[in-house]
Image: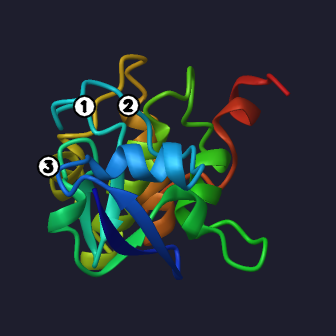
């Protein structure tokens, strides 16, 4: 075991752990953050995604010894009690169904929009390709991303169109 210092959501944390420990385990078990989720454990589904220095990163396969820079989790997107525009767009477009993948979806979308504030539909599909959703809410994900980017969306939640309140 050794002391490892991590900067998570603007706060410095020192943990005593094996350098080969996956970042996800430290975030969830030691720091109590519940945004990143354990999905596949292979870095393929995206449920564990965090942002490290602007890059969407799979925390289940990222060893803490390799982490350098600022780590942002889903919890770190909220500023002064206000949701990040990506989080708000997820609500406005009613993206989640079961909700399990939403951490990965939101964090991947945030990293995409930070790099490319006005992505095309193709760029959105390519940028989000690694964030899997079993409920198949991909069209709502794309609408939420376009909402943040200022693209063409209706401006009202999907449920309001269907008459379900």
**Crowding near the residue tagged with mark 3, few <14, some 14–19, many ≥20 C-alpha atoms within 10 Å:** few
Looking at the image, which residue sits at the far front? 1
Q: Earlier in the sequence, mark 2 or mark 3?
A: 2
Residue position for label 1: 45
Picture quadrant where residue 97 is located: top right
- In the image, residue 165 sits, relative to residue 4, either above or below, namely above
Quick check: marks 2 and 1 in contact, CB under 8 Å? no
State which mark lies toward you, 2 or 3: 2
Drawn side of residue 140 relative to residue 63, left or right? right
Image quadrant where one finds the C terminus: top right
Q: Residue at x 49, y 27 (%)?
A: 100
> Which type of secondary structure does the marked residue at label 2 adopt?
loop
**Crowding near the residue tagged with mark 2, few <14, some 14–19, many ≥20 C-alpha atoms within 10 Å:** many
Instruction: Find residue 109 and report its horizontal and vertical position in percent.
Output: 36, 57
Residue position for label 3: 126
State which mark lies toward you, 2 or 1: 2
> Which type of secondary structure does the marked residue at label 1 adopt?
loop
Residue position for label 2: 38
């Amino acid at each position: 075991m050794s002391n490892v210092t991590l900067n998570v959501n603007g706060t410095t944390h020192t943990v005593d752990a094996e350098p080969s420990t996956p970042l996800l385990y430290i975030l969830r078990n030691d720091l109590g953050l519940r945004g990143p989720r354990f999905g596949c454990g292979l870095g393929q589904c995206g449920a564990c995604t965090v942002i490290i220095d602007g890059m969407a990163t799979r925390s289940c396969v990222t060893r803490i010894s390799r982490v350098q820079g600022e780590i942002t989790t889903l919890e770190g997107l909220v500023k002064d009690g206000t949701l990040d525009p990506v989080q708000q767009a997820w609500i406005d477009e009613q993206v989640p169904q079961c909700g399990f993948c939403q951490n990965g979806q939101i964090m991947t979308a945030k990293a995409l929009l930070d790099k490319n504030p006005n992505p095309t539909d193709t760029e959105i599909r390519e940028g989000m390709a690694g964030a899997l959703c079993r409920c198949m809410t991909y069209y709502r994900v794309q609408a939420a991303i376009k909402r943040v980017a200022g693209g063409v969306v209706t401006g009202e939640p999907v449920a309001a169109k269907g008459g379900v309140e």
